[in-house]
Structure formats: structure tokens, C-alpha cells
Image: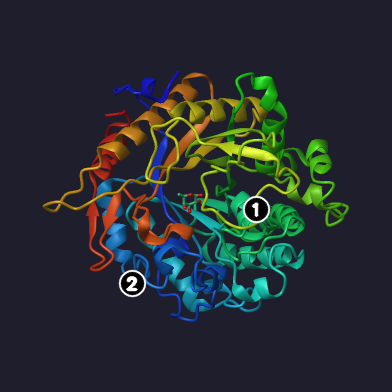
Amino acid sequence: MTAYDYRESGLVFPPSFLIGSATASYQIEGATQEDGRGPSIWDTFSRTPGKVVNGDTGDIADDHYHRMDEDLDLMKRLGLEAYRFSIAWPRVQPTGSGAANEKGLAFYSRLVDGLLERGIRPIATLYHWDLPQGLEDAGGWPARDTANRFADYAAIAGAALGDRVHTWTTLNEPWCSAYLGYGSGGHAPGRTNGAHALAAVHHLNLAHGLGLQALRSVVAKDDAEYSVTLNFHVLRPGTEDPAGSADAMRRIDALANRAFTSPMLKGQYDYDLLADTAGVTDWQFVQSGDLDVIKQPIDFLGVNYYSTATVRTWDGAAPRQSADGHKPSSGTAWPGSEQVEFLQQEGPYTAMGWNIAPEGLEELLVHLSTEFPSTPLVITENGAAFDDEVVDGAVHDPKRVDYLSRHFVAAHRAIARGVDLRGYMVWSLLDNFEWGYGFSKRFGIVHVDYDTLVRTPKDSAHWVTTLVREKRIP
Ligand code: FCB
């Protein structure tokens, strides 16, 4: 099967299949110094020369903080059934610990009320990468105390919003927080130390477990759901004989995927992960009882998927390739497995240079449901960046429509194969601050003019509206 086989209109989703869109606080809010918000690691990182394309920062971003009502009305007009947003920890606790900042909480309270008034289900993520700078200064995710601080924060957010939020997600893509934040240095805080990256992995896992315990102890809504969102590496062999890539694939699967799913869903770190990384760390930061805390029941696993990765073991001859889909940086995102080479993959590509591979999504969903049969799945992010332009008040983005259409087909095929897939959040509602790429990459189904901040729904937004209304792929 190739990407081109995934075109099929007319496929019908069950009425309960939840379709919505997603964003994250630092990427859209702006107002970074208002109403008592403290600095986050992304404020610091984006102000560091050379870290973000064009020196862009989230200072204004989409100005969603001031345009929330307009954005809520837009969501309603588009017919979204759910909105996945994230809460900025430094708005709630400006230094990452201590008393709650009521103004920060009030913003999210208004957002949640605004969603409910419009019949849109709120899916709140507690951590989408904007760690309070104060906690980074105290050691960041490599320090165990950050997990305890996260639990306090979860309790504050849960107590304030827990009577209304339908779904809680602890972390978004801890892979990025740990390995890009502390390993490769491509993301905030930009540290490059493999041992720190692995300690961050564990403390993020611990934060997930402690955070769920804290939420469950305060949330007032009995039918609230709890989840975590992971990004998965769907691997392809980079050698003609797949056996030649087996070790590279196993290593990346261990570091990228099983480092999170095994503790969270099975209560263990896999032996091969510990062995592969033995030269980097002794894992002494895992204390007795931690794995029981990390393995908390979840109502579904959030799946973020964009493309596949092709790997093999570098033979030392040709120059080493590292087409891993992320902004080049100085450190390693793969502690203990630096010998793995990421190869340029077959197109077609998005504007990120990521290959379009809907079959990878189907394969991933089937794999996860086989591996964890009692855990329902929700696609919490999928989407694509393309270079869009407004022409005569419209944005024609046929490539994004095609991308989404094929990935919805993949999701539908997974359901037909027995996967308990409950919903699909398109990344992203709005064009926004794409981390190291700044505003140079547009993922929105709604175009944002960064001079005027005018929002213009793209053709893909209208496509989503039809999809939601008919629960049928247009
Ligand atoms: C994911 C992030 C999200 C966005 C998309 C393109 O890794 O969770 O914030 O940047 O990629």
C-alpha cells in the first residue's frame, strides 16, 4: 500500500466518534507577561539567538488570550465537537510552585465555560511544554522534584476546572520534552545531556502518574476522563534486507515509544531500554514504588501521528544521515543509540519535509490496540503544514484537505479492523508558533495573518465542517 491508496470518500464514522481540533497554550496565546503569568522555558529559549527561525517568539502569537471569544465563535461556526487546548502552567503558578494565580485560572475557566456554552467538549492538557522557568532553574525535568510540583499544579487546575472539563490529559508528547529539551537541545530548555534526557523521561512518567492521582482526588465531575498523549515513532527499515535494520528499529522503538508506554501501561521499564542506555545512565533515579505510581488507569491513550521514520545502523562509511524530521541541533535525541541513522524517506512531503504516510497511522492504531487491547485510543493530533496564502479572502489548501482525508481513511480502516478509536483532533485549529520553526510553518485549518491577526478559515476547515456534520468523509 502506498499513501495514494488511501483515498476513499463516503466512509461513515459512528455518531459517537468525536471530531475536533487542537492547539497549545504557548503556540497561540501570546500575552506572555499579562495577568501575572510567569516566564516559561519557551520564553527564554525563543529569546536566545539562533534557537528559533527568524527569532520568532510566542509574545503575541495568535493573540488568542485577547481573542478567545472570537476563536470560540469560530469553533462553533466550524461545528467542532471538541477542542483540545493546553493550560499554561506559568499562568497558574508563575514560578511553578506555591499559590495559584487566580487571574490565570480565570482565563481557562472562561474558556471552558465558553466551550460548554457552545456545545464543544473541553479536552484540557496540563503540560504542552511550557515549563515555568523557575522550575527549570531548580533543575527542570531531570530533577525529581519537578514531578512533585506537577502534581501540585494538577491539583490546582483540577480543583478549579474539574467540575466542567470532560477530559484531562497529563502530558503532551513527553518524548519531545525529554529528548529534544534535554538531549538534542532543539527544544527548550535546550540542554544537551543524554543522562539528563533519560532522567527527564522518568520524571515526566512520574509526573503523569502523580498528576493523575492528584487530579482524581480533586476533580468534581464523576464522569471526567483521564489520558496522556504520546507521539509514536512508526519505524521502517533503512536496509534492503529488513533484518539489517532490526536492531536500529528495536532501539528507537525502546527509546521513543516503549520508554513511555511500558511504565504507563505495564508498570515497567523494558530490559532492552535499560541495556541500550547503560553506558549513559544507571537509572538510579527510578525509586522503589515509582512504577506503581506511574501505572495509573487511563480512559484512553492519546495518539499524535504525522509521518514515519526510516532507520538503520550507520556503517561508518558514507556520511551519516539524520533526517529525523526535527530541526538540526547539536546534541543527541537518542542517548545510547547515536549509531542509528535516520534516512530521508520517500515522498510526498509536507512543508516540514515530513513524508505523507497514512498507512503508518493505520498500522500504529492496529499495533497499539493489539498491544494494549483494553485501552481505547483517540488521535489527539494529526495534520500538516503547507505554504498557504490568502487570495481574495479565501485559502485554497487542497494538499491539506488531501492529507486529512487520507488520514481519516486510515483511521476508518483501523476502526474497521477492530480498533477502539474514539475520536480525532486535527492539528491545528489556527496557524501558530511552530516551536523551533517559529511562524514559518502553517499547520492551521484556519489561516492567521500575523500582521493583522485576522483569521480566515481555509478550505480544509470547511472540509472538516462537512465531515463533522455528516460523520462521513467528504
Ligand atoms: C507536535 C506538537 C504540536 C505541534 C505539532 C506539529 O509534536 O505536539 O505542538 O507542534 O507537532
Q: Could you say where residue 75 lies in the image, as x and y percent from the top left?
A: 30, 52
Q: Which quadrant of the structure image shows residue 303?
A: top right
Which residue is more in the foreground, 246 or 212? 246
| Residue sitting nearer the eye, 221 or 16 | 16
Q: Which mark is residue 58?
A: none
Give the numbered dot on residue 66: 2
Quadrant for the C terminus, please: top left
- Decide if residue 379 is on the left or right side of residue 10: right
Horizontal side of 124 relative to 408 (left or right) equals right
CA separation, marks 1 and 2? Answer: 33 Å
- 137 vs 119, left or right, is right
**In the image, the residue with mark 1 has its CB under 8 Å from the nearest atom of ligand 1:** no
- Disc sitting over residue 179 in the figure: 1
Which residue occupies the foreground of this view, 246 or 384?
A: 246
In this view of the protein, which residue sits in the foreground, 325 or 220? 325
Q: Residue at x 37, y 53 (%)?
A: 441
Q: Position of residue 199 (x, y in %)?
A: 76, 57
Query: Counting residues from the N terminus, which is met first, the one under dot 1 or under dot 2?
Result: 2
Q: Is residue 185 above or below residue 123?
A: below
Residue at 61% x, 25% y is 239
Residue at 47% from the left image edge and 39% from the top image edge: 306
Disc 1 on helix, strand or loop? helix
Contact check, label 1 and label 2, Cβ < 8 Å: no
Is residue 67 placed above or below 431 in the rendered structure? Answer: below
Mark 2 near ligand 1 (CB under 8 Å)? Answer: no
Which residue is the extreme one toward the left?
392
